[in-house]
Image (tube, coloured by chain):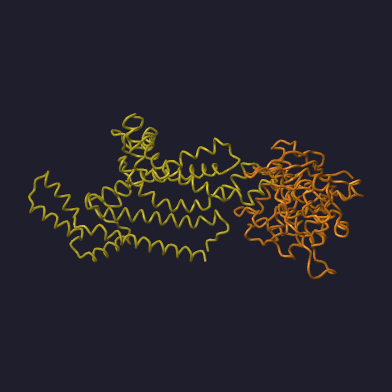
Amino acid sequence: MRLQLILRRVAFLILVVWAASTITFFIPRMSDRNPIRERFAELARTGGFSASDLEVIVESYNKKFGLDKPLMEQYFDYIGSVAQLDLGVSLNRFPKTVTEIIYESLPWTISLLFVSAILSFVIGNLLGAIAAWPRAPGWLRSIATPFIMFTGVPPVLLAIFLLFFLAFRLKLFPLGQAYSTGIAPDWSFGFVLNVMWHQVLPAISMILGSVGGWVLSMRGMGITIQGEDYVNFAEHKGLGGRVIFRDYYLRNALLPQVTGFALALGSLITSGSVVESLYALPGLGSKLGQAIQANDFMVIYGIVLFITMSVATLMVLVEFLYPLLDPRIKAD
Amino acid sequence: MTHVLEIRDLQVSYYTDLGRAIALNRVNLNLKAGEKLGLVGESGSGKSTMALAMMRMIKAPGRIESGSVDVDGVDLMKLSDEEMRLARLSRIAYIPQGAMNSLNPVMRIGAQMVDAIRAHIPDMRKEAMIEQCMKSLESVDLKRNVFQMYAHELSGGMKQRVCIAIGILLKPKVIIADEPTSALDVVTQRQVMETIDRVQKEMGAAVILIGHDMGLMAQFVDKVAVMYAGRLTEVSTVRDMFTTPMHPYAQALIKSLPNLKNKGVFQGIPGLAPSLLRIPTGCAFHPRCTQAMESCKTTIPEVQDHNGRLVACHLYTEGA
């Protein structure tokens, strides 16, 4: 039973990834821009080789990457190589492979998006739960209010605002980049600190706007749960306020929020990519942005596919995690 | 025998936007160890408010305004919040109405029992706690494996038994059961009531049984207390209450019950229960009372002892 379910989910995962890769395959191809021509045209301007040479070079690269074949044939070639986990080469930065680009930028994305997603989930839900808890002191309950005001402010706007005031005007934080120029990446304490220093503003831009959403949904959930008979009975049992809050109230109110977290991960990548490019962080998002600008469709395919795959995998993971949180749901 | 529960002048009001609603109006009640009292009355007559007031669980906008609740010689109203928390379940336990939702769906039954013990006796060894929970489950006719189960794996009757098992975990002196059988079918109702009856006899605790079901009451309690508009109107033994009710409201209540001799049309009580925001002057029942006199409209009748029966009615007041 259990194995069958896992197989079914994996099959569904493959279907999602296939559908996503098919759609992303054709969209960049609707434009007649050729990333190879664009790259060499730029070289031609600075390097000074003739227009006829350019055509020859582009022609030969088109052949090399198989871009001269009919589109459908390219599509099947692509699906075939993806199935072998080969994402191909960047058209703009060859011989760099797409896998290398993803591998390089992934740590920056994980450290920013993942950490800020988890932080805003934890902060938002805790504040929301406290805001709805009648026995919490008033000042503690009101902490959530300012966060609600930031709900709906796009992270981009916050990022620009923070950059201008805190980094540009007050010079409290660096203006961008993953780490200060002139120091070499290693695992020393100083370097890690430097990286974290650079991550503060991007993280705040990501967190500030999303905490309010969690606060609002958790507060609503909390108001429902605190009226439940089992929370009342817990008090009749003579339990301390802390135990009631944690085991009876929070645990039950958190259940739908976990589903919300899985859903939020998808939209996180979108807002994260803009924040990444604004702060010039070499993460997946800004790489994707650059690839779209250069119409480097191999990189677009690779990154979109990777994101789709990770979000879909996380969703399946949450689904398997859910029965552990709520015993009423069985995974079969 | 001394009283294990003594309620004196207990008064609770709810401060609503429409004004002050006196939900419990200077209630006095005594109960001996091992005694079972049935508390009956219409919806909104103050039964549940009384239970919550005894647990000191009245939430805003409600307020306990005066009175004392002595359990085993300790006045609960004078305890600090922390002392009251410790008194819950260990001195006075509450078995909830609607046991269907009274258990946490994401915690095992055992964990919900152990945390109750731990809240009172934090130093107790884990194994001893588990053993005490197991014994409690067995005493309400549940198997030991219920300890490992979740609420959704139990039937309604089993859930109610679990609530009873939790209620008796720390051998309280007073147990309040608030409509413990309201969502159960009649067969399960009887089984649950027999369980309460048995554990109560074993422990010698005083029980207050709140409910509407006079038939069920008649079978299980020793005394019946009738509430009307936040006041106690009559407290008598079951036999007296069902054969010779004294207060006109109690009389009307008994008359409205079906019995073997009187089949056919039953007599209802004319009128509606008064709003707690506008309780009639004098005796709250006088607008619906067939035997109302002039004095009923002006003076509130005091509860008086008539050969062991407590009645609040001018009919029995000397010289009235």
Query: Quick check: can you spot residue A115?
Result: no
Residue A307 % position (x, y): 36, 53
Q: Where A248 sits versus A174, above or below?
A: below
Residue B151 % position (x, y): 64, 57
Question: Is residue B130 or residue A141 the one in the foreground?
Answer: A141
Image side of residue B33 versus residue A221, left or right: right
Residue B75 % position (x, y): 78, 38
Chain coloured orange = B
Image side of residue B278 versus residue A278, left or right: right
Q: How many marks?
A: 0
Q: Quadrant of the N terminus of chain B?
A: top right
Residue B224 % position (x, y): 82, 54
Residue A55 falls in image quadrant: bottom left
Residue A14 falls in image quadrant: bottom left
Question: Is residue B277 or residue A149 the one in the foreground?
Answer: B277
Question: Is residue A131 or residue B191 the one in the foreground?
Answer: A131
Q: Which residue is situated farthest in the bottom direction here? A: B264
Residue A194 falls in image quadrant: top left
Chain coloured yellow = A
Query: Quick check: can you spot residue B289?
Result: yes
Question: Is residue B130 or residue B260 the one in the foreground?
Answer: B260
Residue at 64% across, 44% down: B16
Q: Which residue is situated farthest in the top direction here? A: A170
Image side of residue A266 versus residue B117, left or right: left
Residue at 33% across, 58% down: A85
Q: Which residue is situated farthest in the front direction here? A: B294
Image side of residue B47 versus residue A22, left or right: right
Q: Where A327 sits versus A179, above or below?
A: below
Q: Where B68 sits versus B178, above or below?
A: above
